[in-house]
Image (cartoon, rainbow, N blue to C red):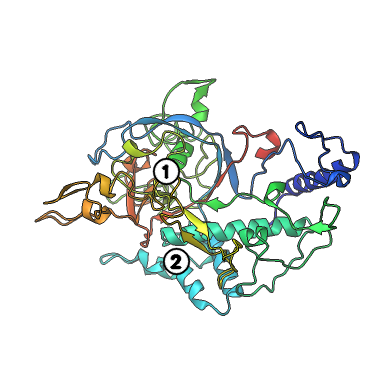
């Protein structure tokens, strides 16, 4: 998996420019008059005009305001996504769902590197038994879907929310490691073992050295010759992660194709124009725009004219991409998003970058305030913030905000005890009432969206939402990764390529 040469050239040129501009000392601080990037004046490094480059597999999604929520009839009568206006910052998202081949690459790396920790590999394995049904013969998919090359470019399924999040973290490290290798800052080392493997955060904090490359980063500090790459160099990419629900819904609608300046010409029900699920173009009129169930017992159409060309899932680049260049944002498989589910999140979340699920953490430090060594897998250790840590905070008052305003003590009415019981929690609020079967809502409930190959057309609308325990998996749920856009929300043409 290699970057395009233009991407590497841009980063390398930026790094060279950072070092070379110190020779002339032309950049000068507007507050002190001292020259930037000049060893003669201490070598303080300053880079202007930074433009984030697009990581492999990603498409740029320019953010903005939109009406988030369900505007068509809520046939399920859930009323859990009422329309409201929000703003989503610009970000990047995978063009396609993560493929079986991508996930097998991940497993191969884990098995090759974590030789002393086989449980890591076992924990990451997708659940292939999700294909089984008591009254259906699906054993061929149990045996073949994940491993057989015929399905390499199909979306991975049987992956729970926790596994998908772990994959995103692993992908971040592999992409950033390759950047440093291709720049010559690190030497390629395929013999990394156990905790001695490249981790982006561990590298930035000095907890991973690796093998120095032939072109180390020059240090403009007159007391040093070379140094490791720092976060303020802008060379390493932000982390890959699961998209928030707002990001996913915004990207799926692709309303940039229906707007002129600040006027939205018409809203979409699906990731394409119109209120129907068939192609309206003259060339392919009548063909399905996504992979879903047309009706009772009809998953693929009739022989000789398989309308959606899929019995179960299909190739991740099937059908037309939407206006952001994203494939299968409706149908094929549902997709995990980052948010914790609550039926009334639309009443609680912020108007800017809405999201429910924050658990604020801090790095584990020793008595001198230094980062404690890595864990056995090479990752920086974190702990959840305590009341002492956030004592003087005004912008948040607790570290775990999954049940904020919906499940915490202030929002609970406990039978027989009344309002605002300080010991109340999500379990109390969504506890089973006498004679009921109870509620599945908990702090582990995660949202998934998009509709899948087992779903009717209703679920293809980006405004619909469902949830599942983050530890569970299904044969019609996959995922794709996102990445934060830093700096200007408007990307240059060069960074989009």
Q: Nearer the viewer, residue 381 or 284?
A: 381
Mark positioned earlier in the residue sequence (2 or 1): 2
The residue lying at 44 percent from left, 29 percent from top is 66
Query: How many other residues sit within 10 Å of disc 2, few (<14), some (14-19) or many (≥20)?
Result: many
**How far across and how far down the image is residue 28, in percent?**
82, 34
Where is residue 425, by image quadrant?
bottom left
Image quadrant holding the C terminus, namely top right
Task: Give the total number of marks visible in the rendering.
Answer: 2
Residue at position x 24%, y 38% in the image: 75
Rendered image quadrant of residue 79: top left
Residue 490 drawn above or below residue 131: above
Q: Residues within 10 Å of mark 1 (few under 14, many from 20)?
A: many
Q: Position of residue 105 (x, y in %)?
A: 58, 65
Q: Which residue is tagged 1?
A: 355
The quadrant holding residue 76 is: top left
Question: Residue 126, which numbered label?
Answer: 2
At a point 31% along the width and 46% down the height, the residue shown is: 342
Q: Is residue 269 left or right of residue 439?
A: right
At 52% from the left and 60% from the top, the residue drawn is 167
**Residue 312 visible at all:** no
- Calculate the distance from the C-alpha at mark 2 to the C-alpha at mark 1: 27 Å
Task: Examine the rendered structure and indicate whether residue 411 appears above or below residue 143.
Answer: above
Query: Is any atom of residue 41 visible in this view?
Result: yes
| Quadrant assignment for the N terminus | bottom right
Q: Position of residue 80 (x, y in %)?
A: 29, 40
In this picture, is 104 found above or below 25?
Answer: below
Task: Give SS at disc 2.
Answer: loop
Callout in the foreground (2, 1): 1
């Amino acid at each position: 998996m290699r970057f395009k040469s233009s991407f590497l050239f841009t980063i390398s040129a930026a790094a060279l420019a950072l070092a070379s501009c110190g020779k002339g000392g032309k950049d000068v601080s507007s507050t002190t008059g001292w020259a930037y990037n000049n060893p003669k004046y201490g070598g303080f490094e300053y880079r202007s005009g930074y433009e984030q480059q697009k990581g492999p597999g990603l498409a740029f999604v320019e953010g903005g305001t939109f009406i988030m929520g369900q505007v068509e009839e809520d046939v399920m009568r859930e009323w859990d996504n009422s329309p409201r206006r929000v703003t989503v910052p610009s970000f990047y998202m995978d063009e396609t769902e993560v493929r079986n081949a991508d996930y097998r690459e991940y497993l191969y790396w884990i098995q090759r590197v974590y030789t002393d920790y086989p449980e890591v590999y076992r924990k990451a394995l997708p659940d292939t038994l999700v294909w089984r049904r008591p009254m259906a013969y699906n054993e061929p998919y149990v045996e073949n879907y994940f491993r057989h090359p015929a399905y390499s470019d199909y979306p991975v399924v049987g992956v729970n929310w926790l596994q998908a999040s772990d994959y995103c973290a692993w992908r971040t490290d592999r992409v950033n490691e390759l950047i440093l290798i291709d720049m010559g800052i690190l030497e390629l080392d395929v013999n990394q073992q156990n905790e001695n493997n490249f981790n982006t955060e561990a590298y930035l904090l000095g907890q991973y050295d690796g093998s120095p490359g032939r072109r180390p980063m020059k240090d403009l500090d007159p007391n040093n010759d070379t140094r490791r790459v720092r976060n303020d160099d802008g060379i390493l990419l932000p982390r890959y992660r699961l998209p928030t629900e707002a990001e996913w819904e915004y990207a799926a609608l692709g309303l940039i194709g229906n707007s002129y300046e600040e006027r939205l010409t018409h809203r979409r029900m699906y990731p394409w124009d119109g209120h129907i699920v068939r192609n309206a173009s003259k060339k392919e009129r009548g063909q399905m725009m996504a992979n879903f169930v047309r009706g009772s017992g009809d998953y693929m159409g009739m022989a000789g004219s398989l309308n959606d060309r899929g019995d179960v899932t299909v190739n991740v680049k099937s059908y037309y991409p939407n206006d952001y260049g994203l494939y299968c944002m409706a149908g094929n498989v549902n997709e995990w998003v980052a948010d914790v589910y609550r039926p009334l999140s639309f009443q609680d979340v912020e108007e800017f970058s809405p999201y429910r699920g924050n658990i604020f953490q801090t790095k584990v430090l020793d008595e001198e305030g230094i980062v404690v060594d890595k864990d056995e897998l090479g990752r920086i250790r974190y702990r959840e913030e305590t009341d002492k840590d956030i004592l003087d905070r005004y912008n948040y008052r607790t570290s775990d905000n999954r049940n904020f305003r919906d499940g915490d003590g202030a929002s609970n009415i406990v039978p027989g005890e009344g309002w605002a019981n300080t010991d109340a929690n999500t379990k109390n609020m969504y506890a089973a009432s006498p004679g009921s079967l109870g509620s599945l809502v908990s702090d582990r409930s995660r949202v998934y969206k998009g509709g899948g190959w087992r779903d009717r057309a209703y679920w293809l609308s980006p405004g619909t939402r469902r949830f599942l325990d983050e530890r569970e998996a299904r044969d019609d749920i996959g995922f794709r990764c996102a990445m934060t856009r830093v700096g200007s929300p408007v990307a240059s043409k060069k960074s989009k390529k």
